[in-house]
Amino acid sequence: MDKRYIVTVVCSALGLINANEFAQAETVGRYECSVVGPVSQEPIGDKDGHRLISIQYSCFGVEGLVKGALYSGTATNEWDGPQATYLFGGGITRAAGGLAVAQVTEGASGPVVMEEGKPVGNEFSGKGVFKFASGTLAALSGKAVRWETKPAGFGRFTLEIRTDEEAGAIRTSKE
């Protein structure tokens, strides 16, 4: 085979791979979070296990654009037995020279995570949007995102955020 043909094929393949990578979701970052204060549980009263739960939490950015940033958030979920649906959520990211406000637009619980035969929490995933961002976080302004949480011990969880690109959607099950 002609060397120019091989070079053309290789360069074309690399170009396609690079274009595919461009279309994938970018990682905004990952936080390590802790529940702050008491968890508010309000029975709805129509049946056992149907309740509203509200939490406040604080997070520290450990990867990506949010590395070193602090996030203060709140979430309210409707629980029907072991399944939850997000009703309200969001928070504020504070970084050196930057500020961003996020709003959860949808979310739901995933499977109960078990360790040593005991439930340690649920995984959650959903979508959101950065309604406002400035300074060092200005690139997030108006960005649609996908988020995912995983339990990390009693009252603790990780929160991963990615841009909401169709080709790079966050996985919704454990690997």
Image (spheres, rainbow, N blue to C red):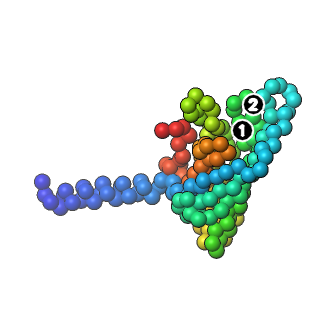
Residue 10 lies left or right of residue 28; in this view the side is: left
Q: CA distance from mark 1 to mark 2?
A: 9 Å
Splitting the image into 4 quarters, where does residue 19 fall? bottom left
Residue shown at the point (45%, 58%) measured from the top left: 22
Residue shown at the point (85%, 33%) measured from the top left: 44
What's the amino acid at mark 2? Asp
- Give whichever of 70, 173 is nearer the camera: 70
Residue 57 lies left or right of residue 43; in this view the side is: left
Is 169 rendered above or below residue 66? above
Is residue 146 at all visible to an observer of this figure?
Answer: no
- Residue 74: x and y in percent read 74, 51
Is 107 rendered above or below residue 31? above
Is 18 rendered above or below residue 148? below
Helix, strand or loop at label 2? It is strand
Which part of the image, by quadrant, shows the N terminus? bottom left
Residue at which label 1 appears: 85
Mark 1 / mark 2, whichever is N-terminal? 2
- Residue 94: x and y in percent read 67, 66
Does the residue at mark 1 contact the one at mark 2 (Cβ under 8 Å)?
A: yes
- Residue 147: x and y in percent read 61, 49
- Badge number at residue 80: 2
